[in-house]
Image (cartoon, helix red, strand yellow):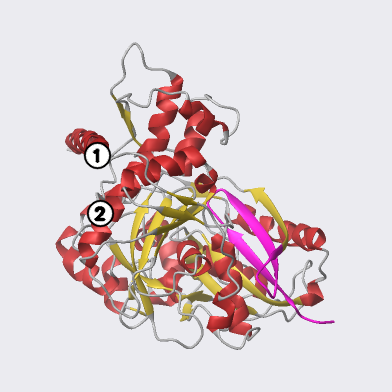
Amino acid sequence: MARDHLLVIDQGTTSTRVIIYDTKLQAVGQAQVEVLPTYPRSGWVEHDPEALIASVGSQVTTALLNARVRAEQIAAIGITNQRETTIVWDRETGRAIAPALVWQDRRTADACDKLRDKEEWISKATGLVIDPYFSATKIAWLLDNVPGARRRAEAGELAAGTVDTLVIRHLTSGEHLTDSTNASRTLLMDLATDEWSGELCNVFGVPIGLLAEIRPSTGDFGATRGLDYLPDGIPIRGVAGDQQASLVGQGCLHDGQAKCTYGTGAFLLAHTGGRIVRSQRGLITTRAASVGEEPPQYALEGSVFIAGAAVQWFRDGLKAIGSAAEIGDLALRGDPDCEVVFVPALTGLGAPHWEPSARGTIFGLTRATSMADIARAVLEGVAFQIGDLITAIEDDLGDSLKRLRVDGGMSRSDPFLQFQTDVLGQPLDRSPQAESTALGAALLAGVGIGLWPDREAAVALLQSGGRTFEPARGYEWRARALERWRRAVETAMGHYRKERR
């Protein structure tokens, strides 16, 4: 039987999705189930590792059935995942010692503050900033707060990793591996060498023996073994963190190309080729996925913690709508000249501000404010954040980004993308496939297993034909709107910084 399909596991913050692709990178079947995080305290965000793993098998089975593809037809598996989310588990049994700490979790803010005197050195080594967002302080917190964990870690009984590592362990019955894109998000990998740094591990209090072996994104990550839903021997050949996978799926493989993915958060990446560009504007430098045998590739990234999560909050917290899709029509009924501003810092502010103590704030409420106005402000708040990131990236690159490619759940909303392009003052292109993250992982896995003669043949398969959005508002409107937004952000940050003191 011909092995002519690719299976991609896309484990995200709020769901696990499995998609089956043919060798032309067309999706032929998929399955998805919600796997929601929990919020046990203010600023704490957790996942149940057992629930994450349990969701994989059920969705693989359903996706294969929906695609009418047998497991024996799978040439290779690709994995893409929520990044930075951190798990520590028993090396022998694979059982986690505590809930996973999600990338949005802010409990280690104080630990990060204690390392500010080392920030310049750490940033130079890793390309990152010191923030609870990343994995290092999460690992240390688990070791210090789960009874006996640090002793067991030092004795070699425990392993730590991001979600890709946990899924690989499950699929292979024991391999302890990660790829360079995920490793570059931990604050523990030297960006220039693609290796764990003993000095960084010492600073963060993380035993280096806990960590997985780092391999290229199109490397050998073992093969399936001991599963009740897939036969033994299916190779895992493509692994990348969700945003780097999306960069591949959008066809952004060359210096100067940029994309934004709107998921739970929003993530803007600009490819910088083989150059490590050090940001002066609060962005981070990260590994991009290397495709095939090419040398290491890099990107500048701005991460917004709350994007689709703001819509979820509007739906579930305020109970203002019944489904996320309703917010666009409601927002269109709002006053376009209303000056309500929503700063969506529900779990702190990410790039380029990096204020973990900030919280969501609404400005400009009057007796005339309606729920439609607030809906509009929620969507606008996400778009304003991306405007900040574009400005920062252009300053760092010393050049303007001519176009932006977008994907993810919120990109399906025409009202949102129209406001986004108005804020940016430049056109943007919506991907014809909403889920370029899984598509990128499929391309990596196919290249890794040799389904195509070269990477150019694979990239040529990526669909074109998405919609282009053009600005409908002029410079004066944009300048007034951005000034209003900047005042709101500065006020919100100043207020919460004072409270923290």
414 is higher (above) or lower (below) than 158: above
The residue located at (75%, 70%) in the rendering is 227
Q: Residue at x 50, y 45 (%)?
A: 410
Q: At 50% from the left edge and 74% from the top edge, which residue is drawn? A: 178
In this rendering, does residue 439 appear at all?
yes
Residue highlighted by disc 2: 391
In the figure, 388 relative to 249: above or below?
A: above
* Residue span colored magenta: 1-27
Query: Are the two marked residues, 1 and 2, in contact with CB atoms closer than 8 angstroms?
Result: no
List x then y, in percent, for residue 76: 67, 77
**Closer to the camera, 26 or 450?**
26
Outermost residue to the left: 117
Earlier in the chain: of badge 1 and badge 2, it is 2
**Identity of the residue drawn at 42% across and 30% down:** 376
The quadrant of the picture occupied by the C terminus is top left
Q: What residue is pinned by disc 1?
A: 482
Q: What percent of the width, then of the height, locates residue 86?
A: 46, 60
Q: Amino acid at mark 1?
A: Leu
Cα–Cα gap, marks 1 and 2 = 11 Å
Left or right of residue 470: residue 131: left
Q: Which quadrant of the structure image shows residue 225?
A: bottom right
User: 280 left or right of 82?
Assistant: left
Viewer-closest of 148 and 262: 262
Badge 2 element: helix
Q: Position of residue 246 (x, y in %)?
A: 50, 63
> Which picture quadrant has residue 135?
bottom left
- Whole-percent x, y for residue 435 in the image: 57, 57
- The answer to whether one can see residue 155 in this image is no
- Magenta span includes 20: yes
Q: Is residue 273 magenta?
A: no
State the quadrant of the N terminus.
bottom right
